[in-house]
Amino acid sequence: MSGRRDQHESDHRGRTEPTLGNLDQLDAPPDRATLRDPPPRDDLPSMPIEPRNARASAPQQRKRRGWLVPLVLLVICVAAAMWYGRGFLSNSLLPRTELNDVLGRAQQALAAGKLDGNDGTSARELFQAAVALEPDNDVARNGLHQVGMAELSQADAAMQAGQLDVAAQKAAVARELLGGGSDVDKLDRMIATKRASEVQVSTLVDQAQQAFAAGQYGGDHGAGALYRQVLTADPGNAVAQHGLDQVGDALAAQAQKAIDANDGAKADATIEQLVALQPNNAALPALRAARAQTSQQDNAALDTDLQQGDEALRAGRITGPGDDTAFAHYKAALALSPDNAQAQAGLGKVAQALTMQASAAMDAGDAAQAGKLLDSAAELAPKSTDIAAARARLQGMQAHPGAAAPAGGNLDIAQAAPPALSPQQSAQIARLLQQAQAATQRGDIMMPPGNCAYDLYRSALAIDGDNAAAQQGLHALPGAVQQQFNRSLSSGDLVRAGQMLDNLADLAPGDASQAPLGQRLANAWLDQADQQLASGNRLGAMQSLQQARKLAPNLPRVLDLATRLQAGS
């Protein structure tokens, strides 16, 4: 078969059949001569032929162009992000030389304690400058808070040092920086309280100086106590400290004067006041030594007078001229120890003896002698129930001189022809007795005057001196007082218990039951003194000791506590 067809066949069919040519030359590269010389014509239509390499590289070029587009988009996005985030980058990522410099200097000022000022170098000014550069900067804002807390701390220290103006100024700065708060409010209140206390301190100093000028050194309202109040409110007050030293010197001089005058009671009381105010006063050792020497002499003399007084009383030497009577010896004992309970009881016994002698004189019909004896007894025990009853009987005798002899006993005297009472008098006595009983139940034994049980019973006896109910009620008052004493002591009301004991001494002077009651009350005062001393209240302990010493001066606990107080323990 021929490799090509003739022209005639081609024309006959109307088309040209292509031929493949030499297939073996397709893959062979053309030599240069072939490329220079045109190929021989084969009467076929020309067709462009691409090399195999060109056809293979087209898909690769398209693949390369496919990833180039995302890369370009990424670059565009990054550029846009940098454009829109340039503010963030400049604030957070890029160096900020000026802001960092201001913050560094602010931190240094804060560490150095230079908190506020007007020269631009204080911590507050620098942190505020940083905030002006960057309002949302956390470091600057936290720095201002630290400055506020430091100002608050310095304000508290200034207040404690008494620099109230400085404290108020710093507290105001702290309030401005911290925006207020409970700590700032509390400090403002403390400053206000301190200012008010300064006014009070000034008033107390004036009062103390006036008391010192008037010679009032001791007592609750004396110069010593007032200066102590000033030092309690203001421990560093130099005026009060100097004033207290002056009071101490004055008390030491008074104590020495009392020792020289052999006034042991005043010397002891003055020394105790000095110990309470100034336990380390330089004059105390010498005063204690001098007082110990005179105390031995005083105690010996006191014991002698009390013993001789008892002996004179038993011998019937009640009163009279000379110094060997019971009255004289008990008086001498009270001069050595004015609050000595034994000496006071001795005078009560003298009053009882005189009352008994007055009753004997009335039994004998000697109203004049009875009146004299009752007057003497009333000087020693003006509120004695025995004396009141005896005087009522004497008034009845004087009103009815024809009365007969007694029916028995010293006080239960019955007249032979008792005067008849009017209905009005009887009603008045009944009303007085009812009121007296009610007053006794209320505890109004000796007070108030006129409406107490004692006065009401005496008013009834003034109408009818022989009224048995009135005399019985009057003699029952000491027992009622003793019951009130026990209740007050049990409840811890030592002051009222002492008042009841005094009432008992007035109503029944010389009654032997008063001594153990006095010791019970003295021990209660000593218990209180121990508690006060343990809590550091030396002045209160000293006052409680004085109350106990009045009741039982020789009680061992009294001596022990006095020694401990004087030793400053």
Image (cartoon, helix red, strand yellow):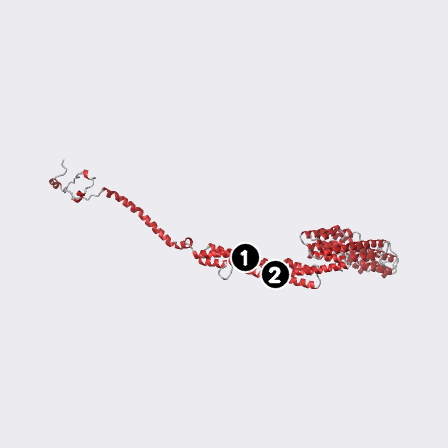
Say whether residue 53 is visible: yes
Left or right: residue 73 compared with residue 414:
left
Q: Position of residue 224 (x, y in %)?
A: 68, 59
Kind of residue at disc 2:
Ala
Kind of residue at disc 1:
Leu
**Which secondary structure lies at badge 1?**
helix
Q: Position of residue 103 (x, y in %)?
A: 47, 56
Earlier along the polypeptide chain: callout 1 or callout 2? Answer: 1
Q: Position of residue 17 (x, y in %)?
A: 15, 40
> Who's the residue at 54% across and 57% down the image?
152
Question: Residue under circle 1?
Answer: 152
Left or right: residue 99 compared with residue 274:
left
Q: Residue furthest left?
A: 8
Callout in the foreground (1, 2): 1
Q: Position of residue 35 (x, y in %)?
A: 18, 44
Q: Are marks 1 and 2 in contact (CB under 8 Å)?
A: no
Question: Residue under circle 2?
Answer: 196
